[in-house]
Image (cartoon, rainbow, N blue to C red):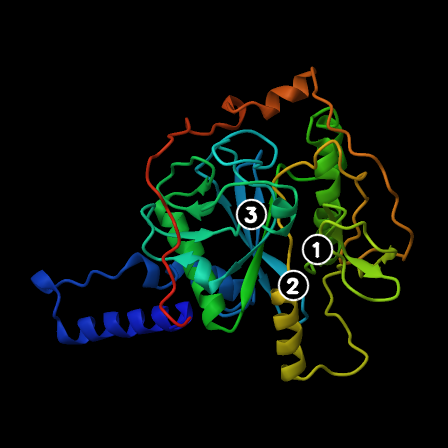
């Protein structure tokens, strides 16, 4: 039984209880996982011309302690729906590298319906999918990294229970609407030129440079970038000369960057009208892309970092290859890599002993 089917059956069960009045005391205890989207969120969707069933995209910004939800419209672009405050996350700026480092991941991740956990010990949760291709090829370890409720974190991104209910409902409705998976881009901060300059002496600066094209291209186009892994690095919006797909541990084949169509708040005009079937196929292809996750800077022995291509760039051009800079910083910026973040008003990290593993799938699934 698929996760989507399970959710639908649960909703049918709740409806039955409402009709028959079978709950103790005559009340109705609706499970958090099947609660309808709050009325305020439904009104906001309507105001923004969005539907509950439309695909979603999630961005996380550590330093700002913010989680964004974006919704896709008929023109194939994503539009900002809402920004949620992250209640808690642990560690410092920089990716997760090994089990027990208490770091919240950074990188490009993908969440399918099987990663949704309605029975989380942290109220509700979804698994980010760490380690991803990038993490595995770089030897990074760890598991069960979540976005969840309960406002406590030991390597996850924790929301308040009320906010995770709304976020969970948005993801659930997107899956019910046909989205096969949604992408999560977890950044250390908003990757503006100013912020990159501010963190230029950080030990993870070289790693962050490989993520920046994914941020830049989405900012320009509002279209999800395609992310690959080769040379043990992220490679964004690349077109490989001669075709083929790159191997994560092998040197990147010859490629060029893909032009970006800048977002101008106008619908994308296709050369031929796109049929509903074509739109659905395009969405499935995008959702099935192996958006490689990043949560650790590359080892000093790995090949030099490459300026990643992004989903849309103004002109095709060669990729500039630059060495990664992972030198420890003795400057003030290095303070942002420490576990304590008194300046962004985070709660003290509560290292909970709860496990939050995804429930096993039913036999045959």
Identify the mark nearer the N-term, 2 or 1: 1
Q: Which structural element holds mark 2?
A: loop
Q: Which structural element holds mark 3?
A: loop
Q: Residues within 10 Å of mark 1 (few under 14, many from 20)?
A: many
Residue 43 visible in rendering: no
Q: Residue at x 46, y 29 (%)?
A: 346
Residue 11 visible in rendering: yes
Residue 52: x, y in percent?
48, 67
**Residue at image mark 1:** 227
Residue 191: x, y in percent?
70, 39
Quarter of the image with the N terminus in it = bottom left
Q: Is residue 140 above or below residue 72?
A: above
Q: Is residue 83 above or below residue 336?
A: below
The label nearer to you, 1 versus 3, is 3
Q: Nearer the viewer, residue 129 or 190?
A: 129
- Single out the residue that lies furthest toward the left: 25
Q: Nearer the viewer, residue 209 or 253?
A: 253
Q: Residue at x 24, y 72 (%)?
A: 13
**Residue at image mark 2:** 289
Identify the mark nearer the N-term, 1 or 3: 3
User: Label 1 near label 2: C-beta < 8 Å?
Assistant: yes
Residue 278: x, y in percent?
67, 81
**Residue at image mark 3:** 131
């Amino acid at each position: 039984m698929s996760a989507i089917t399970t959710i639908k059956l649960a909703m049918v069960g709740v409806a039955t209880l409402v009709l028959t009045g079978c709950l103790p005391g005559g009340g109705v205890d609706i499970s958090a996982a099947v609660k309808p989207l709050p009325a305020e969120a439904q009104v906001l969707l309507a105001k923004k011309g969005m539907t509950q069933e439309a695909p979603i995209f999630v961005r996380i910004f550590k330093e700002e302690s913010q989680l964004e939800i974006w919704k896709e419209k008929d023109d194939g672009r994503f539009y900002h729906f809402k920004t949620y405050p992250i209640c808690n996350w642990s560690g410092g700026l920089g990716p997760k590298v090994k089990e027990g480092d208490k770091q919240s991941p950074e990188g490009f991740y993908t969440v399918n319906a099987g990663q949704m956990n309605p029975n989380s010990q942290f109220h509700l949760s979804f698994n980010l999918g760490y380690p991803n291709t990038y993490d595995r090829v770089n030897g990074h370890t760890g598991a069960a990294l979540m976005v969840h409720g309960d406002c406590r974190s030991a390597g996850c991104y924790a929301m308040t229970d009320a906010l995770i209910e709304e976020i969970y409902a948005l993801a659930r409705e997107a899956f019910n609407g046909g989205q096969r998976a949604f992408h999560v881009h977890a950044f250390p901060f908003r990757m503006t030129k100013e912020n990159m300059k501010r963190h230029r002496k950080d030990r993870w600066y070289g790693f962050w440079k490989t993520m920046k094209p994914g941020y830049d291209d989405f900012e320009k186009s509002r279209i999800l970038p395609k992310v690959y892994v080769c040379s043990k690095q992220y490679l964004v919006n690349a077109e490989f000369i001669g075709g083929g797909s790159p191997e994560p541990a092998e040197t990147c084949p010859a490629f060029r960057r893909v032009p970006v169509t800048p977002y101008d708040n106008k619908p994308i005009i296709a050369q031929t009208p796109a049929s509903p079937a074509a739109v659905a196929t395009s969405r499935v292809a995008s959702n099935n892309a192996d958006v490689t996750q990043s949560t650790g800077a590359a080892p000093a022995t790995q090949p030099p970092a490459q300026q990643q291509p992004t989903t849309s760039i103004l002109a095709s051009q060669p990729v500039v290859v630059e060495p990664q800079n992972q030198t420890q910083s003795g400057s003030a910026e290095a303070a942002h890599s420490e576990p304590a973040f008194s300046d962004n008003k985070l709660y003290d990290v509560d290292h909970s002993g709860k496990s939050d593993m995804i429930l096993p799938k039913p036999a045959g699934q």
